[in-house]
Image: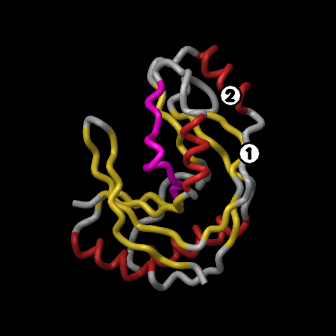
Amino acid sequence: MPRLFIAVDLPGTIRENLEAMSFGLPGAKWVDAQQIHLTVRFIGEVDGVLFHDIKNALHEVSFAAFSLQLKGVGCFPPRGKPRVLWVGLEKSEPLQLLRKKIDAALFRIRVAPEGRKFSPHITLARLKNSPVQKIANFLAGNGLFSQEPFQVEDFKLYSSILSPKGAYHKLEGIYPLG
């Protein structure tokens, strides 16, 4: 059964800039530059019929293109042992509205809402036994990180195949924004 998510891809220059800062942290498993994306909605595993329905329902999402800007770094969870290192985004009302329209389209075909609050971010690395001081140094050294705004002209449906080397993302559909 496919494991699905909906994402916005980043321009190549931004992915390259993120890759350039992805070093120097013991215990970090850095996300491959070609796999870096902004997850708009995680769906999870679905059967073949629902997979087809999702692909069709997403064509009903009508939304204008908009811009996003990456800004800041942080980690999850905010308290306790960090497990994920991320790059944040400047607050974006259009992104929040796009997410709501996608949720509504999925809800109409009985896809359950995601159980957690939408917290837009770009995952840079998964952390395992990374020294807290090294994480703090990385966050301090990259705290002012920001990129030029970029235009979001579509969103994409991906399936994710998990392997010992990490996840492989397969493009399943592209949904242009008008």
Residue labelled with disc 2: 139
Q: Residue at x 28, y 64 (%)?
A: 46
Can you say whether 71 is above or below 96 in the image?
Answer: above
Q: Amino acid at mark 2?
A: Leu
Question: Please, what secondary structure does the residue beneath circle 1 have?
Answer: loop
Q: Would residue 76 be visible to someone looking at this image?
A: no
Q: Residue at x 62, y 68 (%)?
A: 152
Q: Amino acid at mark 1?
A: Ser
Q: Sort mark 2 into few (<14), some (14-19) or many (20+) by Cα contacts within 10 Å.
A: some
- Single out the mark in the foreground, 2 or 1: 1
Rendered location of residue 97, percent (x, y): 65, 71
Which residue is outermost to the right? 144
What colour scheme does the image use? Answer: secondary structure
* Pointer 2 with pointer 1, Cβ within 8 A: no
- Please state, as top left, top right, bottom left or bottom right, where the N terminus lies in the image: bottom left
Give the CA separation, mark 2 to mark 1. Answer: 13 Å
Rendered location of residue 68, percent (x, y): 69, 61
On whether residue 140 falls in the magenta region, the answer is no
Specify whether 106 is left or right of 137: left
| Mark toward the start of the polypeptide (2 vs 1) | 2
Residue labelled with disc 1: 146
Find residue 86 and report its image quarter: top right
Residue range of the region highlighted in magenta in the rendering: 28-39
Q: Sort mark 1 into few (<14), some (14-19) or many (20+) by Cα contacts within 10 Å.
A: some
